[in-house]
Amino acid sequence: MPSLAQEGEVYVLDLGEDENRFHPDWIKSVDGFLDEVAAVEGPRALVTKATGKFFSNGLDIDWLGEHSDQATEYVHQVHALFARVLAFPAPTVAALQGHTFAAGAMLALAHDWRYMRADRGFFCLPEADINIPFTEGMTALIKAKLTPAAATETMVSARRFGGEDALAAGLVDAVADEEALLPGAIERARGLAAKDGATLGTIKQRMYASELAVLLDTSGNPFG
Amino acid sequence: MPSLAQEGEVYVLDLGEDENRFHPDWIKSVDGFLDEVAAVEGPRALVTKATGKFFSNGLDIDWLGEHSDQATEYVHQVHALFARVLAFPAPTVAALQGHTFAAGAMLALAHDWRYMRADRGFFCLPEADINIPFTEGMTALIKAKLTPAAATETMVSARRFGGEDALAAGLVDAVADEEALLPGAIERARGLAAKDGATLGTIKQRMYASELAVLLDTSGNPFG
Amino acid sequence: MPSLAQEGEVYVLDLGEDENRFHPDWIKSVDGFLDEVAAVEGPRALVTKATGKFFSNGLDIDWLGEHSDQATEYVHQVHALFARVLAFPAPTVAALQGHTFAAGAMLALAHDWRYMRADRGFFCLPEADINIPFTEGMTALIKAKLTPAAATETMVSARRFGGEDALAAGLVDAVADEEALLPGAIERARGLAAKDGATLGTIKQRMYASELAVLLDTSGNPFG
C-alpha cells in the first residue's frame, strides 16, 4: 500500500511495492496522502515513486472483473485522481523507478515532470494491444502532455519505451541511473518548493481547463 | 488512377502515376479502396504511396475551375477523405516517394506515420504563396499533427522541406533511400497489423474528436 | 517610447530603450505603428526589437498599482495587443536583443518567429514566482506556441532561459550574436515579405481562432 515520507520540503509518495494497481482502497490511500501534502502550509513539493519492479501497472483489472457493476464509478474515481494530480497546487515530479504502464503511465503524465530510470523498466500505453480504448478523459490527459508524434507513437503503436527512448520522444524529462533517480527527482522538486501553492494551482487549472472538465465530467459513460 | 495491392497483411494503396490530384473520380476510387481495406477481417494495415515523381499535388485546380458551382461540395468531399484516413480503423503509414504538396501533404498528415524519401522530393504547404487560405478543417488537421513551431513554419512560411529537413521538423517520422522507402513503410505497417481495427478506430476517433467534427461539418461555407 | 523604421520591405518596430513596460501610452504607440505596417500596400513584413538591455519586461506594474480601478480594461488592452500580433496580416519576427520577461515574453510568443541573442539576456515567464497567475488569454497564447513540455517548463517552473536553452526548448527559432541578431531577423522577414498580407491574416486567424476568441473576450474578469 502507498506511504508518504518527508525529505525537508519535499513529500515523497510511494505508490507501493507490488504492481501498484488502482484498487479502490489504493486510490483512497493515495488521495488521503495528496490531501496531506495539499494541506501543508508554506513550501512543499511532491515526488511520486514506487518501490521495486513497478511504478504502477494501472487499473485493477481483477477487482474490476469482480465488480463490473461499479465500473463507471470506478473510472470516474480514476479520472478524478488524474485531474487532482494534473492541477495539484504544488510542483510535482514522478520518479519512474520501474514499469509504468497504462493508467500508471497516465498518472505519471499527470505530473509536471517525469524522471525515468535509464537502464531498466518500460513506459507503455498498451491499450491498443489489449483492446481497451482510452476514455475521453484519458485521451485528453495524454494529448495535453505529449507532442502529436509522441501521442501517436504511444497511443496507436502501444510501443514500450525504455528510458532513453522515452527521453528522446519527450515522454519523460530526464533519465538517471537507479541510484541517482530519486535524489535527482527530489532535488528538482526541492528547487521548486518555495513557489506559492495557490498560484501554481491556479496556473495549472487554467493550463488544463478543458482536460479537467472532461476528466471531472461524470454525466456520461466513460466507455463511450 | 489509384490501385490497391496486397503484401501479406499490408495493403498498399498507390495514388497513381501522375500528379495524383484529387479529381472527384480519384476521390471515389481512393474511397473505394479504403472501403476494401476497412472490410478486411483480421490483421490489416495500410500503406499509401504513389508512383513516379509525385505523391500528390492536392486539389484538382483544373477541375475546380471548370466546376466552381460544385466547389463547396467538392471541399466537403476532400474533408471527408481526410477525416476517414485520420480515424482509419487500422495502422496507416504514408510512404512519400515524391512531391507531397498542399492537400496531398494534408492527406499524408492524416496518416498515423509518414516515411519520406531522403534525397528527392519536397513536402510543402504552399497555400500562403498561392493565396488560398487553409479551410478550418484543413487547419484543424494540420495543427493536430504538428508541433506549434512546425505548424508556423509550414503554414505561414510555405517553406519546401526536403526529407532531412522534414524529419528534423517532425513533419515525417523517418527518411530512407528510394529503394528502402516502401519496404521500410511496409515493414512498419506489418509490425502493427495485428492490432484490433475497431479498437484503433475508437482510439483515433477520440484522439481527433474535435478535428473530425470540423472536417465532417458540412453546414458552413468552407471558404469562410 | 516605441519607434518605427523601414529597411526596404521590412518594418522594424523598436519597443524602446528602457524596460519597455506596457504603459497605456506605450500600447497606444505600438498599436499605431502596427496600423501603419498593416496599411502598407504590397510586400511588407514586421520585425520587432528593442534597444539596450531589455526587449520588454511586460505589464507596467507601477502604473497598474496607481490605477487599479482600470485593471480590467488594461488587461483587455494587453490581450488585444497579443491578439493583434498573433494574427497580424504580415510575417512577424521578434528579435530578442535583451531580457524578455512576463508579458514581454508573451508579446514575443505572439510573433510568428523569435530570434534571440545567444550570449546575453533571458527569456522568462516569472508569473509563478511573483504570484500572478496567467490570465486565461495569456494561458491560451502561450500554449498555442509551445510544446507541452516547454509550456510546463516556462509556466510552472518560471525558469529563466538563456539563448541556447531557449532554442533547445523551442521557445525561440534561432539564436545569434549581438551583431548578427537584427540582420538575421530582417533577412528572415525580407524573404517572407512578398506573401499576400490578407492571405496570411486569414491563415493565422484560423490557426488561432480559439485563442483569439479568448483574448478578445471582454465579457469576463481576466483575473478569474
Image (cartoon, coloured by chain):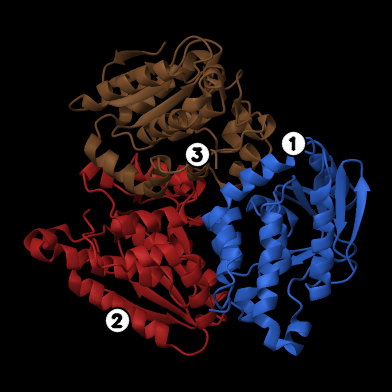
Chain colours: A blue, B red, C brown
Q: Write the residue at 30% across / 62% down.
A: B52
Which of pointers 3 and 2 indicates the residue nearer the eye?
3
- The answer to whether dots 1 and 2 both sit on one chain is no
Name the residue type under label 1.
Lys
Name the residue type under label 3.
Pro
In the rendered structure, the answer to whether residue C44 lies left or right of residue B170 reads left
Judge by depth and name the residue closer to the eye, C223 or B30: C223
Q: Which residue is mark 3?
A: C222
The subunit carrying tag 3 is: C
Q: CA distance from mark 3 to mark 1?
A: 22 Å
Judge by depth and name the residue closer to the eye, A67 or A153: A67
Classify mark 3: residues with Cα within 10 Å, few (<14), some (14-19) or many (20+): many
Query: In x, y percent, where is residue A184?
Result: 84, 43
The subunit carrying tag 2 is: B
> In the rendered image, which quarter is residue A127 located in?
bottom right
Which of pointers 1 and 2 indicates the residue nearer the eye?
1
Q: Write the residue at 74% across / 66% down.
A: A104
Judge by depth and name the residue closer to the eye, C114 or B217: B217
Q: Which residue is mark 1?
A: A195
> The residue tagged with tag 1: helix, strand or loop?
loop
Q: Which residue is mark 2?
A: B32
- The answer to whether dots 3 and 1 both sit on one chain is no
- Above or below residue A161? Residue B167 is above
Q: Which mark is residue C118?
A: none
